[in-house]
Amino acid sequence: MNASHSDVRILQGQTLSFRADPFVVGPDAAIDYNSDGAVAIRAGKILEVGPRRAVTGRFPGAEVEAYPGDLIMAGFVDCHVHYPQIDIIASYGEQLLEWLEKYTFPAEAKFADPAHAADAANRYLDECARNGITTASVYCTVHPGSVDALFTAAQARGFAMAAGKVMMDRNAPADLSDTAQAGYDESKALIERWHGKDRLNYVVSPRFAVTSTQAQLEAAGALWKEHPDTLMQTHVSENVYAIEHAKSLHPYAKSYLDIYDKKGLLGPGANFGHAIHLLPEEIARLCESKSGISHCPTSNLFIGSGLFDMRGLRDCDQPVAVGLATDVGGGSSFSMFETMKTSYEISQLLHYNLHPAKAFYLATVGSAAVMRLDHRLGNLRAGYDADLIVMDLASTPLIAQRMRAADSIFDALFVQMILADDRAIRATYVAGRKAYARG
Ligand code: GUN
Ligand code: ZN
């Protein structure tokens, strides 16, 4: 036996991981929590998670980083975000279709410039690290260079990121439009250049049925079929006007989701953003096809789209895979705490209580599952990638005071999801390396 473990690092603090789905087994049976715990990591992987004495005793000579009182858990996974929209976050006064025209498309047009794209990609990854987001499913722009910029920056920092070039061949400005053929060819070249390199995955990304012709959706379906281990992302049933518009452009389909279904865009690894105004048959089809959905709560409120039915989609007999997402810049925050809080508040309006165990699960394991990565990240488990956050549970005077009355891990988690922001992220580790430390 190796007596010295100088290549092992041990993080000590409270630890939280999930052993099962809290929507299925309930919060108590779902979590593994150590009030005095430790995580051993080596070469970018988690070796062991458990009580501090047991873990520390197993690896004598390991380097120890003590975070007394802090909570160590998996990094957050944001399963739907638009990095090119970082500079139009908090844009006033419009709902989806007008918001796209007025703010989004002009911002995305700037990504024809590779230097602009590289700068935005780096600022985006800084925000991720500062907010404890270690993996995301990212929409780039129509420009292949916008994907190169994001993947280049993510690769240099060791992030596990999924991303794709947006495909749009109608109802978009000319300088943001491709064609069915060009969208296919450029996406295919990007798959060949990036998919499976280091920790990067490609996502076939037809923007939505309003900005793609039938031919383009068909091409996207064909491309995904040719590369079945890539992912697929698009938007569905976000805004009532967009639903009518999409259906009028695709009259052969029975519903908004059916537009995509007819083109082979449903299945494991398909990630539908928003999914707010769904018909019962659309929900049934999502479940049956094992497609996933991204719940984007701050966006759904900020651009006035509607209320996501967590009970009807996830806490039910035929659940759909759901992940939690910031959807910046329709979304108004990079904070997963803010995102969980807004999800809780939306659920309140629908008379459903989103338990903190379920919210944290959706923000980690749930999103990882939508991205088909839950076998290797999104949880604190031996063998998983060492993407971790260290959470200061008393990051503001108000939180510190409220925490004095917290009598369980669930109450502590609830206080964080309602009151915390990026100041609660003390450190973010990406593949075992410290990617961020609060100053
Ligand atoms: N639907 C189509 N494109 C977008 C986008 O960029 N953001 C949001 N929220 N919805 C969309
Ligand atoms: Zn979106």
Image: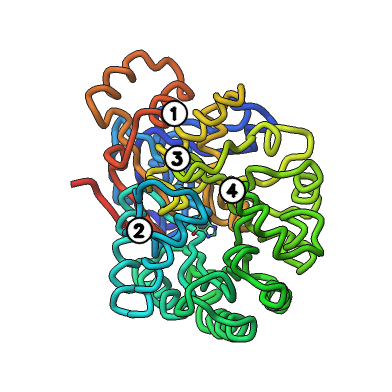
Among numbered discs 2 and 3, the one appearing first in the sequence: 2
Q: Quadrant of the rendered structure where residue 272 is?
A: bottom right
Residue 328 in percent (x, y) is at: 42, 53
Q: Is residue 85 left or right of residue 173?
A: left
- Labels 4 and 1: the sequence-earlier one: 4
Name the residue beneath numbered marker 4.
239
* Mark 4 CB within 8 Å of ligand 1: yes
Helix, strand or loop under label 2: helix
Query: What residue is disc 1 on?
Result: 413
User: In whole angstroms, how far apart are the C-alphas of marks 1 and 2?
Assistant: 28 Å
The residue sitting at the left extreme is 439
Q: How many marks?
A: 4
> In the image, is residue 411 above or below residue 185?
above
Alpha carbons under labels 2 and 4: distance apart:
21 Å
Q: Tell me, for residue 86, which label it has, or none.
A: 2
How far from the left and from the top, in percent, is residue 217? 69, 72
Front residue of 98/185: it is 98
Identity, as a three-letter code, of the amino acid under mark 1: Leu
Q: Amino acid at mark 2?
A: Ile
Q: Name the residue at 35% across, 58% down.
A: 86
From mark 3 to mark 4, how far is it between C-alphas?
A: 19 Å
Q: Is residue 310 above or below residue 160?
A: above
Q: Earlier in the sequence, mark 1 or mark 3?
A: 3
Label 1, label 3: how far apart the Cα atoms are: 14 Å
Is residue 387 in sight in this rendering?
A: yes
Q: Residues within 10 Å of mark 2 (few under 14, many from 20)?
A: many
User: Which secondary structure, mark 1?
Assistant: helix
Q: Which residue in the structure is indicated by mark 3? A: 339
